[in-house]
Image (tube, rainbow, N blue to C red):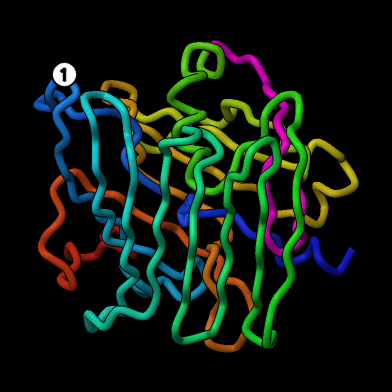
Amino acid sequence: MTRLLPWIFCGALISGALTASAMEAEMPSDAPTGDAERTQTFIGYACGAETGELAYIEVHNMTWAGERLLEDRLSYLRPDGRKFAEKKVDYRGSSTAPEFALVNSDSNHRESLEHGGEVMTVRFQGPEDDAGDSAELPPSDPPMIADAGFDRFIVEQWEELTSGRELVRPFLVPFRLDSLKMLIRRTTEPAAEPGIVAFEMVAKSRFLRLLAPTIRVFYATDSRRLRRFEGISNLFADGGGKLNITIHFPPDPPEPPEAPPNICTGG
């Protein structure tokens, strides 16, 4: 049970990944319709839920082939611009359970997912670990969602989710070296901004729901692009615990490490 308490999402984000575990939810209107590759930069500003201060900046450098997202190379920056972590997400093998590798040089935290035939290998090394652990995961039915693949899942299941249907899927929790059944649904609470629809991901088990925090993501209804993530970050705080954050993805961000005025306060 102790492996569940600081469970990890992305945030992408989607760390970011929801987090996670976090990233572009739809090919922009000016994207090519063929298979020509193009790159695109997408920026998120992670604000501490308790402090209301900028914790870090996510810089996503994405590669597309037509309307298909191939990979995302992320840099995590401190507010002063110093890079302290990086992650590569490869969607070529799966859009919803992509391979990924996260390395945090400040905390020594590492986690990854690799595809290998019919099994996937998950690895996790926490800030206090010297070597870390790994496990092989067999195929699941329905297929597992991993890391920022949650974003692609939302887009691919957009019609079902916006119509009110609740979907249950196993979601990878690297800290546990396993997946956890999660309930994904449109929230009943109205979004604060017009033109925004909100979804949430909660543990399917009502008991585990008391331990695993709710993840909420907010999308623009016209573009189906991620605009805000609320939940636990996939990065560790300086003290070793998990960060409770809100990540904002404004449509026209300035060049990092500059942040939009009042991005964390909404003023």
Question: Please, what secondary structure does the residue beneath circle 1 have?
Answer: loop
Q: Left or right: 206 with respect to 112?
A: right
Q: Is residue 133 one of those drawn in magenta?
A: no
Q: Position of residue 50 (x, y in %)?
A: 52, 72
Depicted 124 relative to depicted 109: above or below: above
Residue at the image position 47 percent from the left and 18 percent from the top: 158
Depicted 136 relative to depicted 144: above or below: below
Q: Is residue 156 visible?
A: yes
Judging depth in this view, the residue of 254 and 85 nearest the camera is 85
Quadrant position of the C terminus in the picture: bottom left
Depicted 74 relative to depicted 170: above or below: below
Other-residue count near label 1 (Cα within 10 Å), few / some / many at <14 / 14–19 / ≥20 = few
Q: Position of residue 206 (x, y in %)?
A: 87, 40
Q: Position of residue 204 (x, y in %)?
A: 80, 36
Q: Mark 1 is on which residue type?
A: Gly
Write down the quadrant of residue 143 in the picture. Answer: top right
* Residue designated by label 1: 34
Judging depth in this view, the residue of 28 and 52 nearest the camera is 28
Judging depth in this view, the residue of 48 and 172 nearest the camera is 172
Q: Position of residue 81 (x, y in %)?
A: 22, 80
Q: In the rendered structure, which segment of residues is drawn in magenta?
A: 163-179
Write down the quadrant of residue 183 in the picture. Answer: top right
Q: Is residue 195 visible?
A: no
